[in-house]
Image (spheres, grey):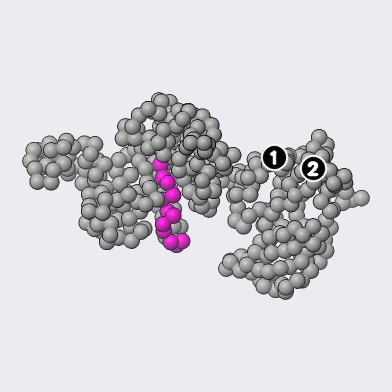
Amino acid sequence: MNTISLHLDKIEKSYGQTRVLSGIDLTAKAGEFIALVGPSGCGKSTLLRIAAGLDHPDHGRVLLNGQDVTGKRAADRDMAMVFQSYALYPHLTARQNMALPLAMRRLSVWERLPLIGKITERSRLSHAAIQSEVEHAADILKIKALLDRKPAQMSGGQRQRVALGRALVRHPKAFLMDEPLSNLDAALRVHTRAEIVDLHKRAGVVTLYVTHDQEEALSMADKVAVMIRGQIMQCDTPAHIYNDPAHLDVASFIGSPRINLIHINQKSNPKAQWYDYPLMADTAGLAHSDITMAIRPEHLMVSVEKTPMSLPVTFLRTEFLGSEALIHLLFEGDNTLLIARATPQHALSLTERQKLFVSVPANKILYFDAEGKRLRSNHLSDVRDENHAA
């Protein structure tokens, strides 16, 4: 296992008057896979380019195993970057594309020449060693049959494997990947995800992986860093990012379908409750502030009969997704649109404008203040139980 860590320390970057990165702090421990995820324009790719040395920060440092490499050229940082566009030389075969970074590093200018480069014993041994490493990487990625093809003779998935192989043969200190699967079809993306995770584990080095696809981020990474407006809003394990978001922006971005949001103005709601659902018990200091309740679709329980603490809703339509379905509902009390997960059998049994009831466990409701910061209460369940008993 490689013991090299990567730390991005207070990275700032602007283009003209546009602030792209605002004091980014991110640490990837040795062997850790971190996915940078966020909407387009949030600064993910810029941060990756700064880590690679392809761009320079206005302020801040890039530390590789504690050593400041901010001023070093990309070629001197020993990091391997995999691009969205594959970046393969079209006139070279897959074998030559994969061998190129090793040839540039190990061979002299004369030894790289095709006709006279193998005259000496030393150069022949160097060429043989490079080819052996290329063959080994190709075997890992199952592309040995493609080694003598040029990029135009390969599919998108095959070209991406070659690009991964070119990164693998370098034995880099870190992998930097910029949306490497965005050009692949859905089925191939799922298959290639597993290959990238396997590649990361074999290499045992830090991997920073940029994607706008949250499913990729959650399924592949050890940690997910959610970037919004040039800032990392939260960096944590996939489970914590999904179940315990620290900010409303994180809760809103992560999850498909999107989390249900219910906005409440406490100033116009002196009872501090959303219909039968009391708000947080320990927000007395926020009595005149707005609060947002957030509920994941899988936590909305839908029934045809009224149950304790349930609210009446109207069924609008169903999204059939094969193994599951999404039910679109309207709470007419305040015209709030809600989405709930359901089994296909349940969803397909419903009729348009049918009256239903929804409820949600108290511990599954997330609360956020007017600025989007997470609010937590240790007394919410007790208060709800008291109200229900009354």
Which residue is painted at 41% across and 39% down in the image?
A: 49
Q: Which mark is residue 197?
A: none
Mark 2–mark 1 Cα distance, whole angstroms, equals 16 Å
Residue ranking furthest to the right: 390
Give the residue type at disc 1.
Glu
Percent from the top left, x then y, of residue 300?
72, 57
Q: Secondary structure at mark 2?
A: loop
Q: Picture quarter containing residue 229?
A: top right
Which residue is painted at 85% across and 46% down in the image?
A: 268
Q: Is residue 157 above or below residue 112?
A: below
Q: Is residue 290 above or below residue 23?
A: below
Percent from the top left, x then y, of residue 308?
84, 58
Image: magenta residue range: 176-187
Any part of residue 364 in sight:
no
Queried whether the magenta region covers residue 357, the answer comes back as no
Q: Which comes before the other along the chain, label 2 or label 1?
A: 2
